[in-house]
Image (cartoon, coloured by chain):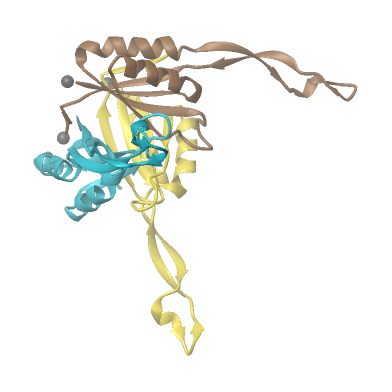
Chain colours: A yellow, B brown, C cyan
Amino acid sequence: MKLIIAIVQDEDAPKLVESLMKNNFGVTKLASTGGFLRAGNTTLIIGVKKERLDEAIGIIKKLCKSRKRVTTSPAPNTWSAGVYMPYPVEVNVGGATIFVVDVEDFQKI
Amino acid sequence: MKLIIAIVQDEDAPKLVESLMKNNFGVTKLASTGGFLRAGNTTLIIGVKKERLDEAIGIIKKLCKSRKRVTTSPAPNTWSAGVYMPYPVEVNVGGATIFVVDVEDFQKI
Amino acid sequence: MKLIIAIVQDEDAPKLVESLMKNNFGVTKLASTGGFLRAGNTTLIIGVKKERLDEAIGIIKKLCKSRKRVTTSPAPNTWSAGVYMPYPVEVNVGGATIFVVDVEDFQKI
Ligand code: NI
Ligand code: NI
Ligand code: NI
């Protein structure tokens, strides 16, 4: 048995959890980190049998992959003659940090 | 030293924590999982000496054991002639998921 | 790779996180424990390369060391002739509980 500790973006968490559960992985969601640090992240604890470790990590990689998104951003230079001019910018979203830890004993009671 | 990561029902957590602390186990309660997933669960981190591992797990098993509870539930077929008829149903409560992980270094400062 | 699970006082957490990040450690803050137990504690997950483990623990020790603080406390015997008489008391603040766990696999995606 292994324990995956996965830190993912809040916006990726619901789909990831749904997919993991559909595939019969036990997932526990820890409350998101708050405020000053990494706001917007969710930490998941996933218990997996050794044989299914790659499968679980594959699901995380598929659903949380780092990607670009085009958004409009108010930047200082978007003001022209007092008129606000939003313009498209690319931002990175997604990504995940994954730790795998060995489990010496696992019990479900 | 071992680390027990125990996911228990919210309603079992207070008694469990009290009992663990009375028995001199160091317990940390992580904030409950929110909303969409396993609402009502609490994750506890318990640091234990190897020699006391079974004792700690025994306390968890005793206080979080899966059990039936009779409750009254509003089900579609409990309406008869427009009158709400609650009737008793059995629900499962309790239960816990326990992971034991080896601790390479433990320090209290 | 190692995982440090550090339970520190809320008031020490911001400076600790700042210092760890300045030194390029990946830190994730789990939501504080609530209410009835160890209120005021924050749990941090820190991923570190084996070679930098002592450095990370050194930072925790420096910024979270247990210390005395003089405060004024309203105690029953501070009332004299109906007048509230606060007097200085020493309280312990700081301190941390540190667990180090081995990481079998670490991925950043
Ligand atoms: Ni195993
Ligand atoms: Ni040990
Ligand atoms: Ni390693």
| Ligand 2 placement by image quarter | top left
Indicate the quadrant containing the C terminus of chain B: top left, top right, bottom left or bottom right. Answer: top left
Residue C102 percent coordinates (x, y): 19, 31
Most foreground residue, A84 or C39? C39
**Relative to A34, C53 lies left or right:** left
- Count of numbered tags: 0
Most foreground residue, A107 or C21? C21
Among all residues in the image, which is located at the extreme right? B81
Q: Is residue C14 above or below residue C9?
A: below
Q: Is residue C52 above or below residue B39?
A: below
Q: Is residue B61 above or below residue C101?
A: above
Residue B8 percent coordinates (x, y): 44, 22
Determine the image quadrant of residue B88.
Answer: top right
Most foreground residue, C89 or B35? C89
**Relative to B66, C76 lies left or right:** left
Among all residues in the image, which is located at the extreme bottom? A81
Which residue shows up at 60% across the image and 12% down it? B69
Residue C39 percent coordinates (x, y): 37, 35
Determine the image quadrant of residue B44.
Answer: top left
Residue A48 percent coordinates (x, y): 35, 26
Indicate the quadrant containing the N terminus of chain B: top left, top right, bottom left or bottom right. Answer: top left
Which residue shows up at 88% across the image and 25% down it? B82
Which residue shows up at 47% across the image and 16% down it? B95
Among all residues in the image, which is located at the extreme front? C81
**Relative to C10, C49 lies left or right:** left
Q: Can the viewer see residue A61 in this picture?
A: no
Q: Can the viewer see residue B25 in this picture?
A: yes
Which residue shows up at 53% across the image and 37% down it? B36
